[in-house]
Amino acid sequence: MVDLALPERLLVGTVDGVRVELARAVLTDRGLRLEWDGVEDATTRALDARFERERATWAAALRVGGTAAAGAPPPMPGDRLRRVTAVVVDADGTELTWTAGRAAGDGTAWRSQWRYPRPTGTRVLVRFTVDGEPTATCTLELPRPPAA
């Protein structure tokens, strides 16, 4: 597993006032993992506080009336990070299709992780979008494979 060098504090987009930055890129034997985070600030704190109030109200309704009365739980505020996507293109010009991903969750409220097949070559181009609109681009250098 190799942590790749990142452009410093690359803003990949803004979602509902939340600034989203590329946090980590990891190359493994199986593939490439990209992680981006919502930057903690007054906006994320307000969204977190609203979510906690909504979740407490939902939990109380669940205890009193069951799932029929409570309905679905409120969405986590970090779910909005799903609107940020990345297109990864390897050195051969092949667009890598993401194989897995997740956003938000208890303990990772403002983190999103996306996995791609292992790229070929010594660099990849990453193009970020929010709601399908281009927002940022970066090139990540990959370690050279060991000499045969």
Image (tube, helix red, strand yellow):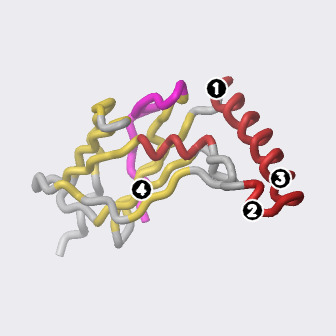
What residue is at 84 percent from the left and 59 percent from the top?
65
The residue singled out by tag 4 in the image is 114
- Residue picked out by circle 2: 67
Q: Which mark is residue 61?
A: 3
Local packing at callout 4 (Cα closer than 10 Å; few below 14, some 14-19, many 20+) is some
Q: CA distance from mark 4 to mark 2?
A: 32 Å
Q: Which numbered disc, 3 or 2, marks the residue that appears first in the sequence?
A: 3
The mark nearer the N terminus, 4 or 1, is: 1
Sequence-earlier tag: 3 or 1:
1
Stretch in magenta:
1-17
Q: Secondary structure at mark 2?
A: helix
For disc 2, the neighbor class at 10 Å (few under 14, some 14 to 19, many from 20) is: some
Q: Between tags 3 and 1, which lies in front? A: 3
Q: Cα distance, mark 4 to mark 3?
A: 34 Å
Q: Counting residues from the N terminus, which is met first, the one under dot 4 or under dot 2?
A: 2
Q: Amino acid at mark 1?
A: Thr
List the residue tagged with mark 1: 43
Amino acid type, residue under disc 2 in the picture:
Thr
Q: CA distance from mark 3 to mark 2?
A: 8 Å
Number of the front mark, 4 or 3: 3
For the residues labelled 3 and 2, say whether their Cβ atoms are less than 8 Å apart: no
Determine which quarter of the picture holds residue 33. Answer: bottom left
In the rendered view, tell whether residue 3 sits above or below residue 81.
below
Given residues 58 and 81, the one toward you in this image is 58
